[in-house]
Image (cartoon, helix red, strand yellow):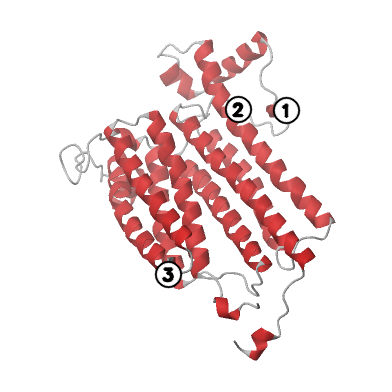
Amino acid sequence: MSSKTQTIAPIDDVSRTRPVAIANWLLSVAFLVFIMVIVGGITRLTESGLSITEWKPLMGAIPPLSEADWLSEFEKYKQIPEYIEITGPAGMTLADFKFIYFWEWIHRLLGRVIGLAFALPFLYFAVKRAIPAGYGWRLTGLLFLGGLQGFIGWWMVSSGLSELTDVSHFRLATHLLLALFILACLVWTALDLRSLADGATKSARMTSFGLIVAVVLFLQLLFGAYVAGLNAGYVSNTWPLMNDSFIPEGIDFTFGAWAAINNDPYLTHFIHRWWAWVTVGVLILLARKIRDQSRMASIAIHSAFGTQILLGIATVMTSMDITLAVLHQAVGALVVASTAWGVHILGREKPATIAA
């Protein structure tokens, strides 16, 4: 141990409790975001996202309380393309509308709960001057990202209220990926704070390999969001081949390869299906690299991606069974959280440099 490292005094017991308390709070918020991702998946799979046609951040927390209120909301929904072209001709009833409204309302309510669960403790810790040096800007950034997520959620919904019969898959991807990014940032910051409480003198850094892992996983999540937004999970219910072909028939290259990669349901499904194995490869390498430092994190990564692969295959082969599809999205969030944990371990300062 270098003399410079030896001169670093450990933080006192009072100071230790503050980073731990803040870390626990952030992990609690991360859990709420995880639940939000699950509810978002249910909202998407039940086609509930366009049931609330207005954005009322405050008054929208109150659901319809009378039959007249319900009929008023239903009339607003009847004006959008989804009802005119799809659900209306299919014979949607008021009871059907109440079901999809419930899931969208729960999704938005949970967003409000997360906002309060972050903002109020943040204010408390700030007033008590309990936030460790260098973390105030991070927590402020997370608060900003949470607010931005609310705006992006409405931006996504608004894309399906005038011309489209569904939301833009690009906007859906932005909404989902930002939620998962916030989840990863919450986990990362909480782990940094726990390391601080244990005597670390530096925050974890993003290593070159960690960045590779993040990019590979990002692409897998992006195409997963495309698959959801384009309803591409329904184009094939066979595995490993897609409708008896490795490269599925029906890919539309009319507007070029780039347009097909970003818009064609057959191609996005194909890419998501096979890029998964590239993702598995880098996650295996990550888990092996951190195994000696944290066997628990290594097991978490293996368990998450292993379960996710099995759920993905099962979801396809059951023609998008809603329970399996929701579990697939939920475990996807766990893959993100466990990967953030592993990449954080990879970038921590070596134990020998931490003051005893």
Question: Residue shown at 43%/35% (left/top)?
Answer: 326
Image quadrant where one finds the N terminus = bottom right
In three-dimensional space, the C-alpha distance between marks 2 and 1, rounded to whole angstroms, equals 12 Å
Q: Is residue 189 left or right of residue 160?
A: right
Question: Residue shown at 31%/40% (left/top)?
Answer: 265
Task: Determine which quarter of the picture holds residue 321.
Answer: top left
Q: Nearer the viewer, mark 2 or mark 1?
A: 2
Lower sequence index among marks 1 and 3: 1
Q: Which residue is mark 1?
A: 59
Q: x, y percentage for residue 93?
A: 49, 10
Q: x, y percentage for residue 195?
A: 62, 66
Q: Dot 1: what SS?
A: helix
Q: Residue furthest bottom?
A: 3
Lower sequence index among marks 2 and 1: 1
Q: Dot 2: what SS?
A: helix
Q: Which residue is mark 3?
A: 209
Lower sequence index among marks 3 and 2: 2
